[in-house]
Image (cartoon, rainbow, N blue to C red):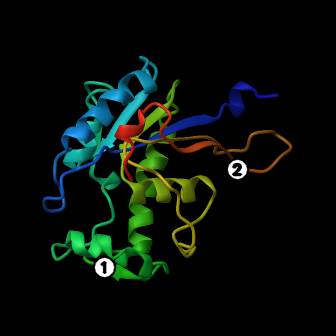
Amino acid sequence: METAQRRGVVFVLVRHGQQERTGQDGPLTARGRLQAAALGPAIALTPSDLLVCSSRQRARQTAEPIGADAEVFDGLDEFRFGPDWTWDHGDAREDLVLWRPEHRSGTESMREFQQRVDRVVDSLVGRNPPGRIIMCVHSGVIDAIVRWAFGHTPEVPWTTEVAVPHGSITELQHWPEGRHRGGAPRHTLLIRVGDTSHLPPDLRTE
């Protein structure tokens, strides 16, 4: 049975809506804006919830229909592939060759990416918010947060990935000091992954 000392933190991880393929920080497309609009009633933000987003335009625009005053963290930005990255690189899934902690592309390594996401998540959990932590972020950041939740340190190779379409919701509950006094010192309940049930079929995009 849960006690006040064993209250889990609920994370609601939202992938941003579909973005225009213009540079590395394109705005939401018309479809992406509709995806974001559908998130407002699906999330149903309450005064006790904490709403945050990355500094990228597509994440900030996705957060707007959920709540007016999302806190912005550049530590939640997508993996920094560097100024030479193009959409052709994305289509070729060159990110899949990056899986060891020391693998690097652009301005950071996989280890450094995990470390900066971990720092933000640790700081948010440290606030002990009374409600949910709702995060409008990116697919790679959601991967990193799931890794953090399951106790994967930045030294653990990236050999897993979560399927999170645009405008999807991934939810987990995390007990940083364990769910039960006699149980494991750290525990995570994965509730749903990449849920798009709030979107009509014509708004579902990868």
In the image, 52 versus 33, the foreground residue is 33
In the image, 93 versus 82, the foreground residue is 93
Q: Would you call the spot at circle 2 few (<14 residues within 10 Å), some (14-19), or many (20 or more)?
A: some
Left or right: residue 160 versus residue 117 is right
Which residue shows up at 58% across the image and 35% down it? Answer: 9
Q: Would you call the spot at circle 1 few (<14 residues within 10 Å), some (14-19), or many (20 or more)?
A: some
The amino acid pointed to by label 2 is Arg
Q: Position of residue 164 (x, y in %)?
A: 46, 51
Which residue shows up at 31% across the image and 43% down it? Answer: 17
Left or right: residue 78 versus residue 182 is left
The amino acid pointed to by label 1 is Ser
Left or right: residue 25 versus residue 125 is left
Q: Position of residue 129 (x, y in %)?
A: 49, 29
Image quadrant in which you'd find residue 189: top right
Up-down relation of residue 71 to residue 107 (above or below): above
Q: Secondary structure at mark 2?
A: loop
Residue carrying label 1: 105
Viewport quadrant of the N terminus: top right
Which residue shows up at 39% across the image and 66% down it? Answer: 113
Q: Position of residue 168 (x, y in %)?
A: 44, 42
Up-down relation of residue 51 to residue 28 (above or below): above
Q: Position of residue 61 (x, y in %)?
A: 22, 38
Residue carrying label 2: 186
Up-down relation of residue 25 to residue 106 (above or below): above
Of callouts 1 and 2, which one flags the residue occurring earlier in the amino acid sequence?
1
Q: Residue furthest top?
A: 47
